[in-house]
Amino acid sequence: MNTSIRDALRRAGGRDPSGPAGESFDARRRWRTTLAGVVVATMALGGMTALAAAPAAADELPPAAAEQATPATDTATPPADEPAPATEDPAPTPAEDPATAPAEEPAAPVDQAAPPADVALEPADEAAAQESAAEAPVVALLVPPGDEVVDKVEICHRTDSYKNPYVINEPNANGDVDGHATEHVGPVFYPEIPKHTEWGDIIPPFYYGDPEDPSFFPGLNWDAEGQAIYENDCVVPTEVPELVITPMSCVEGGPNGQLDFTLGPLLVNLDYRVIIWDSADMNVAEFGWSGVSGEVNGSADLPPGDYTITVEQSIIVDVWELIDEQSFTIEECLAVEAVATGCSLGDDGTALVSLSGLIVDEDYDWSLMGDGVDIADTLTAPSESLDVPFGDLPPGSYTFTITWTGNEEVTATATFFVEPCQPVISVVVTECPAYGGEGSALLKLSNLVEGVEYDVWVTAKGDEHGTVYDGVKTVTGDATHVAEVDVSPLAAGKDYTAWVHAVWADSDDEFELHASADFSLKPCPAAPAKPVTPAGLAVTGTSDPTGPIAAALLLLGLGGAALVAGARREGRVRNGG
């Protein structure tokens, strides 16, 4: 809104149409009282008085600036062409050039300005002065700049943040006139400003353009409130609600925990939201309030884990600003982990049960159950965590359960499996003793689980399902957990593999047991060598074989003749007879 129109409306007793709605006028009046007090105190400490410059200084001001710097009084005579009090919102009027601006009110006498700096006010008088300043028409409290042309102007640039509604900016002078002064023209911010109201920049008056023929910008929101904010480095104190959180683990014994929080005080002209995020940045709980004042509370049921809680507020539609963020952890209430630590040959398995989330000096009932195993007892927790070893366990599956006696709904369970031990096999061979003989092998077995039946056999090396030598042998584990198997005969000069296999089983589980070992037999010794007669050696004496051979042939010939003669005689007898 044009400054002259705004001042005219205020002198006439009307409200600035661009200001807050009528229902917020009292709130703005209280804000004005606070600002007036701040400004008066600031000027008093600096030894200044409002408009302490000589009357000549006021005469040097351009008309528009003089209008802002001149307090309105009932005795001032308005110029003849001053418009009547506004009854409806007038159309926005562009800033007047000093050369064409209409005549304005004459400057008030110096003796009507603020009290001299050396006049001390009583506390009651000071409070009354502040209230009077709030009720009286708004006047300029800062001396506007001279007629020197400027390139840049420091302004209070509006944001969308209620916490920090302004930031200091120093744009080009033309940018102020053509940009900020046309785009951010809402009212001056104040804490009770209605929700979704876009407030405006605060820009002081200045000359810009051609130094030979300068233009004058009368300022934007350059009233008492605007000037007080400007002089405070564009800082407007606003109230930020405080978040207080109380994380609790193991609520009513768990397993979940709980977060309780309070937030306040809230302001009725802002929206608020609280969000709880888990460690994966997932929104796990959200709360919101609109049009609420005072303190609010919230509570969320949360499983164990790490979390972050954030608080945001909004005064502009769909624009949220973060005002607080805190991290917290919900601890485990009661947890149990169990793991087998050693295999079992029958009754020597081991396991370790780890407990956490215990309440010191509280009693817990626990049990360990498996196939043929049922152990139970009561534990008084000596600390918040505890490791409990178990031994003498047969192979099989187990379930460990622990329950807090103070609340039977608080319980934790873990399962584990004790494996039966795997067998171990070694081989002692007996080599072939002589040419044409065979070898054998003695298989020594250990780590046999008591009561388990094992199959043992030998094949060609690596061929588990190939030809079995000397058949499949069977042994049963006993309390000694060892056994021996003899395999014979085995052909010498070959490579073999000894195998052992079994299946352990109970009512719930099956578990394969197996082992193997490679071995070899060396070839049998070679056959003995035959004696050889040397060539050309003379044969004499009784060693000469000629005589015996000739005699044998003679006897053989005589025997044959006798047999022929006998046959003939036998034939003649039969024929004659």
Image (cartoon, rainbow, N blue to C red):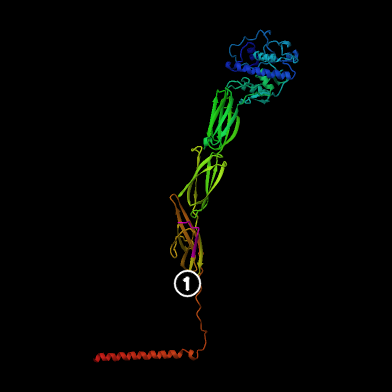
Residue 199's x, y, as percent?
61, 21
Assign the C terminus to one quadrant of the image.
Answer: bottom left
Assign the N terminus to one quadrant of the image.
Answer: top right
How packed mark 1 is, by other alpha carbons closer than 10 Å (few <14, some 14-19, many 20 or more), is: some
Which residue range is magenta in the image?
Answer: 442-451
Image-quadrant location for residue 177:
top right
Residue 469 lies in magenta, yes or no? no
Residue 222 seen from this side: no
Image-quadrant location for residue 472:
bottom left
Three-letter residue code for mark 1: Gly
Which residue is found at the position 46% from the left and 67% from the top?
Answer: 488
Which residue is found at the position 31% from the left and 91% from the top?
Answer: 566
Residue 450 lies in magenta, yes or no? yes
* Residue denoted by label 1: 437
Above-or-below relation of 386 to 99: below
The reply, left or right, for residue 11 in relation to residue 318 is right
Residue 72's x, y, as percent?
68, 11
Q: Nearer the viewer, residue 247 or 142?
A: 247
Residue 263's x, y, as percent?
58, 27
Above-or-below relation of 235 to 256: above
Residue 129's x, y, as percent?
68, 14
Image-quadrant location for residue 94:
top right
Q: How many marks?
A: 1
**Which structural element holds mark 1?**
loop
Residue located farthest toward the left when viewing the structure as drawn: 577
Which residue is found at the position 55% from the left and 24% from the top?
Answer: 290
Q: Nearer the viewer, residue 170 or 272?
A: 272
Q: Nearer the viewer, residue 489 or 184?
A: 489
Residue 561 seen from this side: yes
